[in-house]
Image (tube, rainbow, N blue to C red):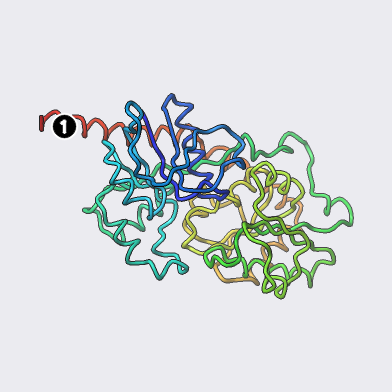
Amino acid sequence: MNICYLLESAALGGGVRVVFDQARALIKRGHRVVIRSLKGDHDWYPYPLNVNYVDRLDMPFSQGHEPDVAICTYWTTVAPGIRLAAPVTLHLCQGYEGDVIELKSVHPDIVFAYSQRVPKITVGQWLADRLYEIYGKDLFPVFTVDQIVDTSLFANRKKNMKIWLPKFLRRQLPINIMVVGDYMISCKGIADALKAVAILRQEFNHVRLIRASLFPVTEEEQRITPVDESYVKLYPRQMVSMFMKTDLLLAPSLPQEGFGLPAAEAMACGIPVVLTKIPSYLSFDSTHDYACFVDIHSPEAIAACASSILKNRLQYTRLHRRGAQVVQNRFDSDKVAENIEKIAESFLTTAKELKVSIN
């Protein structure tokens, strides 16, 4: 199949990486995949891809390169995706934008885009359930294709060691706690994580806070608790390096979170994590034994959970191993590509049959 993904921007971001990972997995299965983007650059992505930068997402394709399948990746790309008039148009949902507080002003436009009779593919069943809750089950079909975590890059490199303990448990060294995400995006819950670190600093003598975000640390963040290391727009390979020196990750996202890729990638690297009880995090495995879970908006609970992990060698080692195991088994790229392939081929077959019957 000829498949075209439509992006607002190819700039570094978790949502863009999901699109790129899907494209790469589909290429491995023999499909021709092109990504159209209005802006940005993709030098940050560690693998080769065919990304075309265009003035309009609905620009005509040259003869012989027309897509069989156009995949819209954000609410703003649905309209141009429909105008492309590909045999099959799909709408990839990584989180329902209508639930994002920061997009309240364009909520009617988001609803209009989602109301189009375009089949939806989601990265998790909780998103499918959310879309059906809002729009019902008659307007469009929704399919879950699941999520990809690059476990060849984000890997537990200490998994074969018989005994592994973080440096702070072996010697009197600082505890490195990492918090990933943009402070100004409310669903990331970053303020809750920072408040938890402030509490932990009252209990432990040497706590270092590492922040990674698409934007510089704000003064408001520093007022909650000092940030020791701050990194902006880390490439995937650089994120791996950060995880390798991290002892614990705090990820207190709210239910509006589409998935929470940094948490999964940290787990893949063997980093114990504290997660909130939200649909996406709870979906990693039915056992719920791969992280320490807390309620949303609970800095005290986050700190208590983190303290328990940091004080208990057995718990720390178990989460170190179990988290990596869950991610390795759960988020397979070939399976996601196969799911997308089956959905697209099914609609493509229907489109061809319809065309024949009309003619």
List x then y, in percent, for residue 47. 59, 33
Q: Hey, which quadrant is residue 108 in on the image?
A: bottom left
320, above or below 98, in the image: above
Front residue (pair 155, 162): 155
Q: Residues within 10 Å of mark 1 (few under 14, many from 20)?
A: few
- Residue at 32% in and 28% down: 63
The number of discs equals 1
Q: Which residue is mark 1?
A: 355
Instruction: Please identify the residue farthest to the right as the structure is shown.
Output: 172
Q: Give the amino acid at mark 1.
A: Lys
Q: Residue at x 54, y 48 (%)?
A: 40
Write down the quadrant of residue 217 in the picture: bottom right
Q: Nearer the viewer, residue 317 or 240?
A: 240
Could you tell me residue 10's position as x and y percent? 52, 46
* Above or below 32: residue 99: below
Q: Position of residue 29 (x, y in %)?
A: 45, 26
Q: Where is 193 relative to 35, above or below? A: below
Q: In the picture, which quadrant includes the C terminus?
A: top left
Does 29 sit left or right of 80 as displayed?
Answer: right
For numbered disc 1, what is the local secondary structure? Answer: helix
- When the figure is inspected, residue 98 is found, relative to residue 223, above or below; the finding is above
| Percent x, y of residue 213 | 64, 57
Q: Residue at x 78, y 69 (%)?
A: 201
